[in-house]
Amino acid sequence: MQLKQKLRIFFLTIPLHISLLFMGCGCGSSQSPAGEANESQSDATLTVTDINFSETVLASDKPVLVDFWAAWCGPCLQMAPTVSRLADAFHGRALVAKLDIDVSRTTSLKYDVSAIPTFIVFHKGKVISRFTGTTSFRGLESMLAKPLETQPDAPQKETGP
């Protein structure tokens, strides 16, 4: 095959590859070409949106770790099993929630989420700590355990793992 023909085929297939990537079927995607998501979320993990964020997260009397994520984000997908494990470990003592930044842009902007994954711990309506990037189970565990260890009226510091 001549170079000219190879280049023509290459450039003709670029739109196909781009459309597959934006449809979520690219490398690192959690979706199959049929659009079916892989289920790795624990039953203990809550899904929050702009609509229910205030009542679920801010009004909670328990600490809440919110995972700001997106389906196209490889590191977010890498963290999903760890987040599910954390939800199971803290079940009954604290809440673990996931917020898709593509669906809930208002909340993402309000909390200045400019990179994902971002993990923010809320307690009694206030941000206690935040961390952006991948981390270990122990890193997330320490973020969520801090508000459980402190006195009810003690001042809280913003820290990360």
Image (cartoon, rainbow, N blue to C red):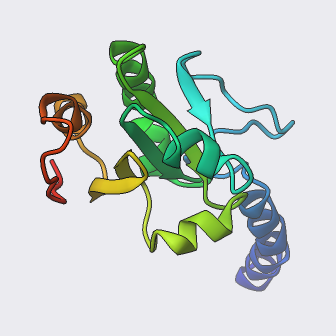
Left or right for 44, reference 123: right
Question: Which residue is more in the foreground, 126 or 7?
Answer: 126
Left or right for 34, reference 64: right
Residue that appears at 13% across and 35% down: 151
Taking the view exactly as shown, the residue that stands out farthest to the bottom is 4
**Residue 29 seen in the current view:** no
Location of residue 33 with respect to 137 vertically, above or below: below
From the top left corner, tell me how far across and down residue 148 is, in percent.
21, 29
Question: Which residue is more in the foreground, 124 or 22?
Answer: 124
Taking the view exactly as shown, the residue that stands out farthest to the front is 153
Q: Quadrant of the N terminus?
A: bottom right
The image quadrant that residue 3 belongs to is bottom right
From the top left corner, tell me how far across and down residue 12 is, in percent.
85, 76
Residue that appears at 30% across and 48% down: 134
Left or right for 146, reference 29: left
Location of residue 159 with respect to 113 vertically, above or below: above
Residue that appears at 35% across and 24% down: 86
Residue that appears at 50% across and 53% down: 68
Location of residue 137 with respect to 7 vertically, above or below: above
From the top left corner, tell me how far across and down residue 91 is, in percent.
41, 14
Question: Which residue is more in the foreground, 83 or 96?
Answer: 96
**Residue 123 seen in the current view:** yes
Total numbered labels placed on residues in the image? 0
Left or right for 55, reference 11: left
From the top left corner, tell me how far across and down residue 126 is, in percent.
36, 56
The image quadrant that residue 93 belongs to is top left
